[in-house]
Amino acid sequence: MISIKNLLNSHDLSKEDLLEIIELGNDIYKSPTDFSHYADGKILGTLFFEPSTRTRLSFESAMLRLGGSVIGFSDSSNSSTTKGESLQDTVRTVSQYADIIAMRHPQEGAAYLASLAADCPIINAGDGGHQHPTQTLTDILTISNYKESLDNHVIGICGDLKYGRTVHSLIKVLNLFSNNKFILISPDELKLPQYVKEEVFDENNEYEEVRSLDAVIDKIDILYMTRIQKERFYSDAQYTRLKDSYLLNKEKMSQAREDMIVLHPLPRVNEIAKEVDRDPRAVYFQQVKFGMYVRMALIIKLLEANNA
Ligand code: CP
C-alpha cells in the first residue's frame, strides 16, 4: 500500500511508493482488461481550471477503463466559480459527489489548498508552474519500458526549464535512483530556477547547464524535450524571441545514440519536427498511452490507501 492519501507533489512519493505504482502500471499495460471492474460504482471528479487534452482525457479514460464513472468540468467558466465561489467550496462540494478528484489549476499550491477542503483524495493534475506529478509517473513508466533500469542514465532536458513544471518533478524523482546525470539545455533566460535546483539536487548529483543541444546530443541516453511555455510569459516580445530556441530534427537525431529515447510531455509546438515521429527512438506518443495506464494504477492505489 502506498504511504500517501493524496498526490499533490512528486516529492511526496517515496521510492517504494513510486515503484509500487509503476509495477501496477506495467501489470495494467500488459493486461488492462484484468482491471476493468476495479472501480465499479466509483466516481472520478475532473476539475480543470486550465486547458488540457492528455491529462484530463487520460484520467477520464483511466476511470472508465476501471469500470468507474466521471463527472466534472473542463472549462470553469461554466461553473459557479464565475459567481465568486472559492476554490475550497467548489472542491468540498464536488467531493460530496466524487470518490476521488483530479484537479488542474493555474495557481501554484492550489492542489494543496484543495486537499485541505476535500472529503476525498485529491490528485494534482498541474498547479501553475509548480508541479505535475502524474506527468512524472507517466515519464517514469515510459522510461522503465524502454530502458532496463532507472539508474545510470545521462538525461538531457531541453527547452523551457524555468516554467516547465514537468521538468521539476521529473528531476526530483529520477534522483531517487542511482547515478543519473543531468544535462540541462536551455537559453539563459529559461534556466532551471535556483530554488528548484536547491529542491531537486543535492551534493551527490551531477548536472551541467548548456545552451546548445547539438553540442551534447551524442552523450544523451534519454532526451526530454519540452515546449516553451507561452502561457507563463509576462512579455510577448520575450516569448517571440525564445520560442524557436530548439528544433529536434532528423539531422540532429543522426548525431544521437542508437539507443537514445526521446520523450516529450506534449503538446509540442515547433521543438520537434514531424519527420522525427517516424524514428523508433521517438516514444512520445507511446508515452501518452503509458499516461493512461499509470493513472489507472494511481487511482487504484489512492482508493486503496483511503479505504484502509
Ligand atoms: N502533458 C500534458 O499535461 O498535456 P495536457 O496539457 O494536454 O494535459
Image (cartoon, helix red, strand yellow):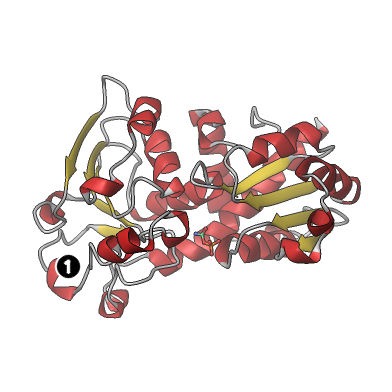
Residue 184 horizontal/vertical position (percent)? 24, 44
Q: Is residue 273 left or right of residue 83?
A: left
Q: Is residue 270 above or below residue 155?
A: below
**Residue nearer the viewer, 108 or 27:** 108
**Residue nearer the viewer, 111 or 230:** 230
The N terminus - image quarter = top right
Residue 61 in view: yes
Residue 5 horizontal/vertical position (percent)? 71, 32
Q: Is residue 306 left or right of residue 250?
A: right
Residue 159 horizontal/vertical position (percent)? 29, 55
The residue depicted at 23 percent of the width and 63 percent of the height is 246
**Residue nearer the viewer, 97 or 49:** 49
Asked where in the image residue 116 lies, by quadrant, the reply is: top right
Q: Residues within 10 Å of mark 1 (few under 14, many from 20)?
A: some
Residue 33 in view: no
The answer to whether the residue bearing label 1 lies less than 8 angstroms from the nearest atom of ligand 1 is: no
The C terminus - image quarter = top right
Q: Which residue is mark 1?
A: 253
Indicate the amino acid at tag 1: Met
**Residue nearer the viewer, 80 or 251:** 80
The residue depicted at 53 percent of the width and 47 percent of the height is 132
Q: Is residue 23 left or right of residue 221?
A: right
Asked where in the image residue 20 lies, by quadrant, the reply is: top right
Q: Secondary structure at mark 1?
A: helix
Residue 78 horizontal/vertical position (percent)? 79, 66
The residue depicted at 59 percent of the width and 50 percent of the height is 106
Q: How many marks?
A: 1
The residue depicted at 38 percent of the width and 29 percent of the height is 195
Residue farthest right in this picture: 96
Q: Is residue 181 left or right of residue 286?
A: left
